[in-house]
Amino acid sequence: MWGKRAVAPEVQELHDRRRQEVRAGGKAKEHLANQAYAGRTKWRNRRWATLIIINLFFILSYHYDLQLLEGSLTASRFFGFHMADPYATMQIGLAFGQVILNLVIGTVTVVLIYLLVGGRAFCSWVCPYHLVSEWAEKIHLILRKRKIVRDHRFNIATKYWIWGLFLVAALGTGYTVFETISPLGILSRALIYGPGIGLLWVLALLLVEIFYSRRVWCRNLCPIGVTYRFVGAFSLTKVAYNLEGCHHDGACRTVCLVPHVLEFTKPGKAEKMRDNYVSGDCTNCGMCVDTCPTDSLKFDVRFVNKLL
């Protein structure tokens, strides 16, 4: 049928067998009971450490004039090399009607980096709001388990409308409107230069995420993540899925910030035995890799591994 992708016969056969196993509750329950994987946090620990170190470099560079990483996450210099947030660069270009060479150079540098390591890896490995939002998520999950709160979901497409809206606002007002409310920018500047009133907005967002909608900013609203999502569609480093080892227990989707990128882990969804890659919306946080009891999800450098 038009629009339907072909599934190899051996893949379909495996899908049918796994559906029966899931209905019977056999291997899926067996692996869910494997507590050795429940507390595995290798990638989370690496990610948290990287995020803290990067933001600490900004702080130390400013306060001790070390000139390691100057500026903030919106625009900076790393040992003299310009780096700039692509979304901020687009806003500035539209607001002021001019191309600033250093910002263009910085944007190209950043895009090249994230084409290598994964577009939305910026969100989970660099952005300070992502870290505090993860902590808020833990509170939300505790409250939800006790049935004090419940999670309200937003349409995943909302962030694309917001992405376009703030670009139009920059063009129409001559001002980078989004940068005044960006929790990334507010937190980055607060860490480096000291706290400001903008932190009240960040606190309000966290309260919404704790009591109303789990991780709603990063998942459904943030336009910065949308920009990196476009980069991530072409990036080399991605999470790859191996159907053969999967028992479809669903633990990966439970912990994932953007579970729609793991849709192919559901019975009958994968098209190939191996090399099923997540979409650009994946943040490469590694939570699914840590959680998978059969190691069916792993980081892979596309095209390169096949040459080795």
Image (cartoon, rainbow, N blue to C red):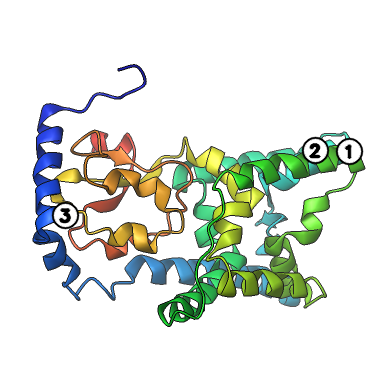
Q: What kind of element bears circle 3?
A: loop
Q: CA distance from mark 1 to mark 3?
A: 52 Å
Q: Residue at x 83, y 43 (%)?
A: 169
Quarter of the image for residue 243 reads top left
Which residue is nearer to you in this view: 304 or 78?
A: 304
Q: Is residue 24 visible?
A: yes
| Residue under numbered circle 3 | 247
| Residue under numbered circle 2 | 168
Circles 1 and 3: CB atoms closer than 8 Å: no
Which residue is nearer to you in this view: 210 or 290?
A: 210
Quadrant occupied by the N terminus: top left
Q: What kind of element bears circle 1?
A: helix
Q: Position of residue 170 (x, y in %)?
A: 83, 42
**Mark 2 or mark 3, earlier in chain:** 2
Q: Residue at x 21, y 57 (%)?
A: 295
Q: Residues within 10 Å of mark 1 (few under 14, many from 20)?
A: few
Q: Position of residue 285 (x, y in %)?
A: 43, 59
Q: What kind of element bears circle 2?
A: helix
Which residue is nearer to you in this view: 186 or 69?
A: 186
